[in-house]
Image (tube, rainbow, N blue to C red):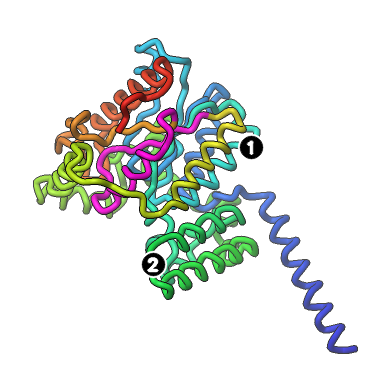
Amino acid sequence: MNVLKFFLKIAFLGLLVLGFNYLLRTYVPYFWHTEFLANYEQLLAEDKSINTLFLGSSRIANGIVPEVFDEEVAKLSGPAIKSFNLAIPGVANGENYRLIHRICQEKQFDNIRYIFLEIGSINYSVGDQFCADKVVNSAKTTYWLDQTAMQTSIQDIQSHPFDGKAKRRYTQNYLVGFIQNQFNAGYYESFLDFYYKRDTNNFGKGTRESRGYRNAEKSKTRLMRKNRKEYLESNGALSNEKAQTSREIFSGKYNVNIKNQQHLDHLLNLIEVAKTNDLHLFFHIPPLINRKHFPEIVALYRKLPDAHKIQTSNILEFPDLYEMDNIYDGTHLKEKGAVLASQYLAQKFVHFKYNKGLVGEK
């Protein structure tokens, strides 16, 4: 009888903790701890005429200027557009997937009609940056892990050509991260930082400008400055290598093949999720993609429906996006490069709207 009472008390205590955690989550948004917070709050401060969002990694955060995109669309007599850059530096695939589901669910996004999502390599889900032992307890790699995001990420792992040991380790790490997220394990200090705005100075550390654009040239981070210095000292070696890879891929020098069908299925599913909520989802390949990931990303791109893909990464079409004068560090564009990239993306978007699909996109 005493044993039964003990286990009942344990169960009751567990329910209390779980209930408290869910109650606490009603007072903080699910993205409370990241630089994304400052960006999201800026979006909410805008008027309700925002109808277009850009999602992706720092390549998008630093590479798309919403006002320039809107002006170019208007100049070409395109549809009425007011856009916002909601990209997250260092984003994981599951992080973006969950964000799209949130956009579909939350009333403050009811006016959104177009989403441009950077196609991420499978390595953005299963690489050491996101699910290795050293980062498994990081809030950045767990805060977005609801049940759908966890299942998607684990499916990516199981479909990837890892050995059995790596698959078990990464799967275990995602399961642990999911449990941490459900119980807010290790999050309380971050919650307090959010609630009392104790970390406000760091929320905008990436120098967000108007409507979410992140100007690389104004970055305050030591890493960005270090990368800039090394890029200049190498005389643009990194972007030159990426330019060569783009040339080889888009000139048809070698074939690119799908390595993870599950990943493609997830992208196709996102298109359907968006459609059911009257959203048009474009998958976008920006310039300066990692050389190792480029073939995989282009392979995915070629399998997507024409009406849901746009690229500005082909050096044969956009050579100036690979010129050193327009590049900050080999991965991110300078402001004038971002202006050009925004104009090119707008031109392709308007072409899509009035030609019913990007016929001939390869």
* 334 is within the stretch colored magenta: no
| In-image side of 54 versus 230 (left or right) | right
Q: Secondary structure at mark 2?
A: loop
Whole-angstrom CA distance, mark 1 to mark 2, is 36 Å
Tell me the amino acid under the disc marked 2: Phe
Sequence-first disc among 1 and 2: 1
* 284 is within the stretch colored magenta: yes
- Taking the spot 41% from the left edge, 61% from the top edge, the residue there is 160
Quadrant of the rendering where the C terminus is positioned:
top left
Q: Quadrant of residue 336?
A: top left
- Taking the spot 24% from the left edge, 36% from the top edge, the residue there is 334
- Taking the spot 43% from the left edge, 19% from the top edge, the residue there is 356
Q: Quadrant of residue 130?
A: bottom left
| In-image side of 222 versus 100 (left or right) | left
Residue hosting label 1: 106
Residue hosting label 2: 162
Query: Which sits in the foreground, 142 or 215?
Result: 142
Q: Secondary structure at mark 1?
A: loop
Tell me the amino acid under the disc marked 1: Glu
Q: Is residue 99 above or below residue 316?
A: below
| In-image side of 218 versus 13 (left or right) | left
Q: Residue furthest bottom?
A: 2
Q: Position of residue 190 (x, y in %)?
A: 55, 58
Q: Give the magenta-colored segment's residue range.
A: 280-307
Q: Residues within 10 Å of mark 2 (few under 14, many from 20)?
A: few
Q: Residues within 10 Å of mark 1 (few under 14, many from 20)?
A: few
Quadrant of the rendering where the N terminus is positioned:
bottom right
Q: Is residue 294 visible?
A: no
* Marks 1, 2: nearer the viewer: 2
Q: Position of residue 113 (x, y in %)?
A: 53, 26
Q: Residue furthest right?
A: 1
